[in-house]
Amino acid sequence: MVTGPVVASPTALDLQREAMDRIGESDLLVITAGLQRKAASLRGLLSDDPSQLDRAELREVLRWVFATRRRADRIVDAVGPERLAGAIARLLDAGAPVAERIDLFDATLGGDGSIGELSGAGIDLPAELLHFTQPARYWLWTRWIWDPGAGTGALGLLTNCELERSPGATRGAVYMSVGRATAFAEETCRAAGFSVAGAGLFGMDVLMAVVYGVYMHTILQMRVTREFTRVIPSLPDIVRRLLGVQGPEA
C-alpha cells in the first residue's frame, strides 16, 4: 500500500543533479539503446510459445537478467527446461491478474526455498520478463528498485512513500505496491521536469538505475581504502549492470 506524500522533490532533485553531473547524455543514449535491444531480444525469444523454449533459449533469456545471468545454467538444471518454460509461459499469459501470475511463478520456481537458485536472486526474474516484453503495460521491479525485506532501493531514495513491507505479503502484492509507487514517482518527476534523454518507455528504469548507481558508488567510495577506489566500476558501468545491458548479450 502506498501512503503519504509520494515524491520527496528536494531529495529527488538533488539526486538527479548529482547523477547528471556524473553521467553524460551520450552514456544515457547508449544505455537506452541497450535496453531497446534487450527488449527486442526478449520479445523475439518469448513472442511465440514460451512453453516450447529449449535449454539454449532459456539460458539466453536468463542471461539478459542481471540477477540470473551468472546462474543461468544452474537455474535451468535445478528447475528443468520443461518446467521453467511452462512457468514463463503462464507468467506471460495475460488471462489472469498479474499479481496472481507472479505468485504462481514464485511458487512454481522455488519461492518456498525448495529451489535455492531461484529463492534468492531469481526473485527479480518475473518482473524483468513482463516489463521487457511489454514495457508499456508492466513495470520493472528488482531488489535494487525495492527490497521489501531490507526496506531499501531506488524507490526509497526517490520517494518518501510507504511501500509494502509486510512479512506475510506475497511477491505479487509487493509488485502491485511497487507499480503504484513507480507510477506516482514517474508522474511527479515528469511534472518537476525530470527527464532522461532518449529513454522513451524505459525512462523511469534509467532514472532509478542512475539514482541507485550514484548511491552505490558513493557508499563504495566511503567504505573502501583509497588504493581500491580504482577498481570501483564507473557509474555508467554500474547502471548498465543493474539494467542487464552489460556484456556480450547487449
Image: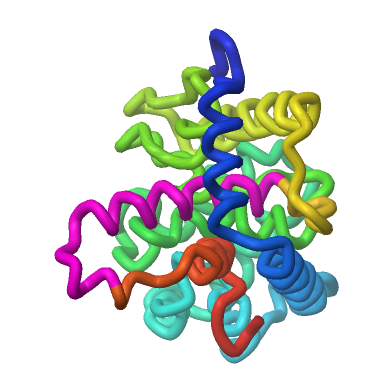
Residue at (55% x, 8% y) in the render: 4
Residue at (53% x, 45% y) in the render: 18
Q: Position of residue 6 (x, y in %)?
A: 60, 18
Range of the magenta residues?
204-229
Q: Is residue 95 left or right of residue 86?
A: right
Residue at (56% x, 17% y) in the render: 2
Q: Compare residues 131 and 75 and report the one nearer the observer.
A: 131
Q: Position of residue 16 (x, y in %)?
A: 59, 41
The image shows residue 114, relative to residue 146, as above or below, that is below
Give the quadrant of residue 31.
Answer: bottom right
Magenta-drawn stretch contains 217? yes
Q: Compare residues 181 and 85 and report the one nearer the observer.
A: 181
Magenta-drawn stretch contains 117? no
Let me know if residue 42 appears in the view: no
Q: Main secondary structure of the magenta part?
A: helix
Let me know if residue 151 appears in the view: yes
Quadrant into which the C terminus falls: bottom right
Residue at (83% x, 71% y) in the render: 47
Quadrant into which the N terminus falls: top right
Q: Is residue 211 left or right of residue 110?
A: right
Q: Compare residues 137 and 93 and report the one nearer the observer.
A: 137
Give the quadrant of residue 101.
Answer: top right
Q: Compare residues 247 and 20 and report the one nearer the observer.
A: 20
Give the residue at the far top of this rendering.
Answer: 4
Q: Position of residue 17 (x, y in %)?
A: 59, 41
Q: Position of residue 228 (x, y in %)?
A: 21, 73
Q: How many marks?
A: 0
The image shows residue 243, relative to residue 163, as above or below, that is below
Q: Is residue 149 left or right of residue 192?
A: left
Rendering colour mode? rainbow
Give the quadrant of residue 172.
Answer: top right
